[in-house]
Image (cartoon, helix red, strand yellow):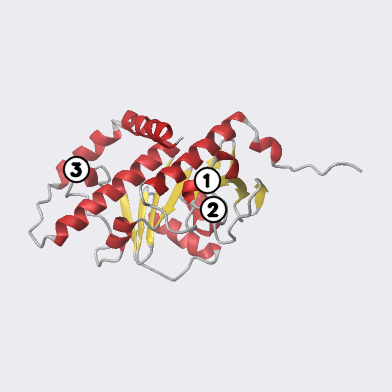
Amino acid sequence: MKAEVNPGAEIFSESSVVELRESLALALRAAAYHGFGEGVCNHFSIALPQQPDLFLLNPRGLLWEEIQADDIVIVDSDGNRIAGRHEVEPTAMFIHAAIHRIAKKSCVLHTHMPYATALALTEHGCLDTQLSQNAMRFHNRVVVDKQYNGFALDHSEGERIAIAMGGADIVFLRNHGVVVCNDRIDYAYDDLYFLERACGAEVLARSTGLALAGVSNDIAAKVALQADGERLQSALFFKALGRKLG
């Protein structure tokens, strides 16, 4: 009898994909280490090079802190598992697939991390990018999706969110959480980390009840450009997390 061939096995073992699996698993463990996880919910995904209709994704039922490279699965845009030994949450790709396809983002990180989500619950709905230095790196990169419709249980809701992004890297989902995107995993994780740091500083500052001292639009825009020119720091931070978390 002829052995059944897994059509995704060859893709799964390609060196570039192996490296991406390791990086995605590291990003998930780092997010757990920094307190960004929530049970076994939420997902990180990245499109495969040369095959943008296939994606690496964390599987169903694993804590982010325990995920290793061989736990990562390959899925198509409908969330069907192409390769990998774990199951996939059926709704996992409803938000991610649309953002990859419509917003043209390679790496998509979705969390309910505490401080960013806290700001998503406010009337303003997001971070003030003219307050802290960390917040200014996101100036003109953030949008708010103010239309909360409950769980994203179909592709139409993901498509609505992707369209609402309007090309932005980061979307605060009202009453829900946040999505951070970039073309590289290390850059995306760096943005995720500093976004939550900036949101935490704003929440703490607002809790004092004191008047807040923002900067001008010009200064915030200048700092955003400066931060974008220091992306070596993003790569070095991610490598340091690799040494820390193994």
Name the side, left or right, on which 236 lies relative to 205: right
Q: Are marks 1 and 2 in contact (CB under 8 Å)?
A: yes
Residue labelled with disc 1: 67
In this image, 192 relative to 43: left or right? left
- Which element is circle 1 on? loop
Q: Nearer the viewer, mark 1 or mark 3?
A: 1
Amino acid type at image mark 3: Gln
Q: Type of residue at label 2?
A: Leu
Local crowd at mark 2 within 10 Å, few (<14), some, or many (≥20)?
some
What kind of element bears circle 3? helix
Is tag 1's residue or tag 3's residue first in the polypeptide sequence?
Answer: 1
- Mark 1 is surrounded, within 10 Å at the Cα level, by few (under 14), some (14 to 19) or many (20 or more) other residues, namely many
Q: Quadrant of the N terminus?
A: top right
The image quadrant that residue 148 belongs to is bottom left
- Residue 48, percent across and down? 57, 39
Q: Earlier in the sequence, mark 3 or mark 2?
A: 2
Q: Is residue 126 above or below residue 100?
A: below
Q: Residues within 10 Å of mark 3 (few under 14, many from 20)?
A: some
The residue that disc 3 covers is 133
Left-right relation of 213 to 4:
left
Q: Work out whether 147 lies above or below 19.
A: below
Residue, x 70% and y 39% (percent of image)?
9
Observer-nearest residue: 170 or 212?
Answer: 212
In the depicted structure, whether residue 138 falls above or below residue 241: below
Which residue is at a point 43% across and 71% down the rendered structure image? 149
Report whether residue 209 is seen.
Answer: yes
* Residue in the image at 32% along x and 55% along y: 143
Q: For mark 2, what is the residue? A: 62
Alpha carbon separation for disc pair 1 and 2: 7 Å
Q: Name the residue type under label 1.
A: Ile
- Residue 56 spot, x, y in % from top left: 56, 44
